[in-house]
Amino acid sequence: MSPIDGAEVAKHSSKNDCWIVLDSKAYDVTSFLSEHPGGAAIILKNAGSDATEEFKKYHPLSYVDDYLPKDAFLGPVDPNTFGQLRQTKDETSQKPSHTDPNAKELPHVSLCVSTPDFEAAAKAVLPHKSYIYASCSANTGASLKRNLDDWSRVTFRPRVMRNVGQVDTRRRIFGHSSPYPFYISPMGTMGAIHEGAEPEMVRGAVRKGIHSVMSTASTKSSEQIMQTYHDEQKRLGGASPTQLFYQYYMPVDHTKAVELIRLVKRCGYKGLWITVDTPVLGKRTADRYLQAEEALAVGLEEESTAEWEAGGDNAFAPAMGGRPVQGQLSPHTTWQDLEWIRKEWDGPLVLKGVQCAEDARLAMDYGCDGILLSNHGGRQLHTAPSALMTLLEIRTYCPDVLSKLEVFLDGGLLDGNDVLKALCLGATAVGVGRPFLYALGAYGSKGVERCVDVLADELQTGMSLLGITSLDQCRPDMVNTRRLLNDMWRPEEGSVRSKL
Ligand code: HEM
Ligand SMILES: Cc1cc2nc3c(=O)[nH]c(=O)nc-3n(C[C@H](O)[C@H](O)[C@H](O)COP(=O)(O)O)c2cc1C
């Protein structure tokens, strides 16, 4: 195949005739434009040019083989003609980097003394699109607001005069010791937040010894992430208790679904967290505005989304403002799938996204080892219950779940003290998402470390002030849940409680 001139590629830069260069090779992506889950606009902006660097912010290069039709490949670009490719406008200000002189000034990391400080810092330096991706929530934002509010609707009942000079914050997750009862929640597409993506997050986690759950929708491959983990462990002489778990979005294709589990196993992830609150993508309102604006900016009208909202065979990975990606995630998943998954995976199995007592009980009946009470950070169902509310339901209607399974919560946690509330009510540990993502975006792994310190400091102080010296001493009578209980779901009169 003879090399193609950069000048030739540059000519194909419209929506009816669109070529791009990736990794020094030219591709005709005209017919792929309308199928691109990230929208046509972002590719059109790079039409006729070398899109490699932009592409790598969001995707591994393997996506080219995985998703582009074979006949899209046109040939290698003549290296002497690279200069003749279409030049896109300088995107420096779009880099998720605080080295950009145009970005607002980034406060010194030590000035981040509470987790909301990381959000303010990230907002100042991240490209608008990246910030929207991290911060957005479903519909009117009601689920997210409820997540945030409910933590302070539960209040403490502290005990005094208990010799609390020394506190022990350690907790085990599936037998793996952790210095703190919180871990980093799985979040996709970290490459849009920091150029070091997931590996940079993992370095911070390993240095602080906290566990982390890695997303199926990660920018980097499962192998690359695990390699970083081992490299960092080696650097520290294997001293870190950190373990990596894997968040699993089940692909539609059964062979692929099995393949993915086997890969996760080979890589050595310590648990499989199956996300079950995402059969279709929630309506991410802020993303929708952005996508429509971007499309209009390159002269496209945003296509109607009704078809994929309806579900069917559509699938996706929830990347930036994620849209359906054919084959990536199955809306057809049922409880029966747990049977074959269990045959493939003999390690800890957690359902991520349980939102009522009935499903908590089913998870137990189907042999899961854990459940994560979560509404996906308020990004999925409009007006979904907070994890705390679901925990109260479980305590009321099927408390045996709490003694048989490891129970995790996530969503809206901004303060180390709130972790204690969940533990008093029977939780094993709590997942923290956005605070770590913002910390990563603003300061890289140093920010991740600082975020652990902030939460740990609040937790330690909280334990002393609550009157406990170890987490085993957390008791339900140390919190007042009355206000949340008032709002808690109850079976309608006449229905039988034992149905639960
Ligand atoms: C031409 C080959 C491309 C392929 C095969 C491809 C494939 C995909 C796929 C499968 C997704 C779904 C989410 C995921 O798994 O991460 C996605 C989303 C995305 N892609 Fe691409 N992509 C291509 C080009 C590009 C380029 C050139 C850019 C940027 C300059 C880009 C930016 C994005 C963004 C921002 C998303 C997030 C989704 C959203 O906004 O809804 N992609 N792409
Ligand atoms: C930007 C972003 C990306 C996410 N990506 C995933 C994902 O790929 N898989 C998943 O199961 N959950 C994902 N989640 C949900 C988180 O795992 C977690 O449930 C949620 O963020 C917890 O709420 P918090 O951010 O308020 O702490 C994502 C959340 C955010 C904010």
Image (tube, grey):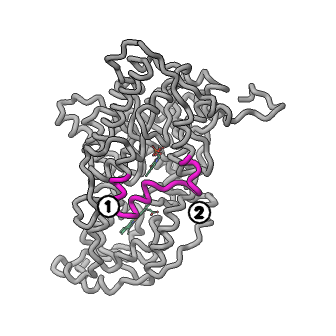
Q: Secondary structure at mark 1?
A: helix
Residue 394 occupies which quadrant of the picture?
Answer: top right
Q: Residue at x 59, y 29 (%)?
A: 481
Q: Residue at x 51, y 52 (%)?
A: 329
Residue 99 occupies which quadrant of the picture?
Answer: bottom left
Q: Secondary structure at mark 2?
A: helix
**Residue 164 x %, y %:** 36, 16
**Residue 468 x %, y %:** 42, 18
Q: Name the mark on residue 57.
A: 1
Quadrant in which the N terminus is drawn: bottom left
Say if the magenta span includes residue 275. Answer: no
Residue type marked 1: Lys
Say above or below: 305 vs 387: below
Residue type marked 2: Trp
Q: Is residue 458 left or right of residue 253?
A: left
Along the line of sight, the residue nearer the viewer: 463 or 384: 463
Q: How many marks?
A: 2
Q: Main secondary structure of the magenta part?
A: helix
Quadrant in which the C terminus is drawn: top right
Q: Residue at x 63, y 36 (%)?
A: 356
Say above or below: 99 vs 497: below
> Can residue 286 be seen here?
yes
Mark 1 and ligand 1: say if the CB distance to the nearest ligand atom is below 8 Å. yes
**How dense is the environment of label 2, judged by Cα within 10 Å: few (below 14), some, or many (20 and up)?**
some
Q: CA distance from mark 1 to mark 2?
A: 25 Å
Say above or below: 255 vs 236: below
What stretch of residues is rendered in magenta? Answer: 120-145
Q: Which of marks 2 and 1 precedes in the sequence? A: 1
> Can residue 339 be seen here?
no
Say if the magenta span includes residue 139. Answer: yes
Q: Name the mark on residue 308.
A: 2
